[in-house]
Image (tube, grey):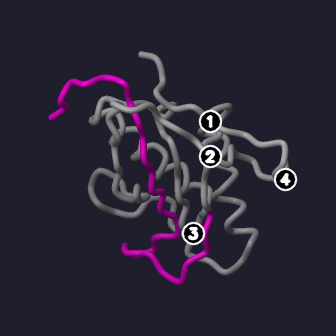
Amino acid sequence: MTSAVTLIRSAALSDAAQYAYAATAPAGSRLIFLAGSCPLNADGSTAGIGDFAAQAASCIDNMKTALNAAGARITDVISTRVLVASSDQADLVSAWNVVRDAFGDHDVPSTLLGVTVLGYDHQLVEIEAVAAVLDTEEIH
């Protein structure tokens, strides 16, 4: 399946960012809005307690599962928001490096935020995402 997502870069903006500054999807593409992907194991327990990178990896795995259920892949993601429960920039970077590596060359527009607290016990990371696909089939 061909990706509906086109990443936009601009030479007029800083190249310090490790992602595209914008992305588009054509008219008629199906948008998929994912709930925040949390670092939860199948039994509901929190994965990687105390480890920002491990929790980010768990979030990515859970996000891929949700994307698959919606008929999409990680390369169909059009934007992300990465929430990290810390005011320490090093913790944010630790989580971000995992996310960046998971996306590889498909470096979608992203926002990285330090927040006070997240919803589950011991939760340090959550990843929100929007994806776009070209198919028109309804997924259940």
Secondary-structure class at tag 1: strand
Alpha-carbon span between mark 1 and mark 2: 6 Å
Secondary-structure class at tag 3: strand
Whichever of labels 1 and 3 marks the residue nearer the N terminus, that label is: 1
Q: Position of residue 93 (x, y in %)?
A: 72, 61
**Label 1: few (<14), some or many (≥20) within 10 Å?**
some
Q: Position of residue 30 (x, y in %)?
A: 32, 35
Residue designated by label 2: 22
Whichever of labels 2 and 3 marks the residue nearer the N terminus, that label is: 2
Residue designated by label 4: 14
Residue designated by label 1: 7
- Tell me the tag on residue 84: 3
Q: Does 42 sit above or below residue 82?
A: above
Q: Is residue 84 left or right of residue 25?
A: right
Q: Residues in magenta?
A: 112-140
Q: Position of residue 111 (x, y in %)?
A: 60, 60
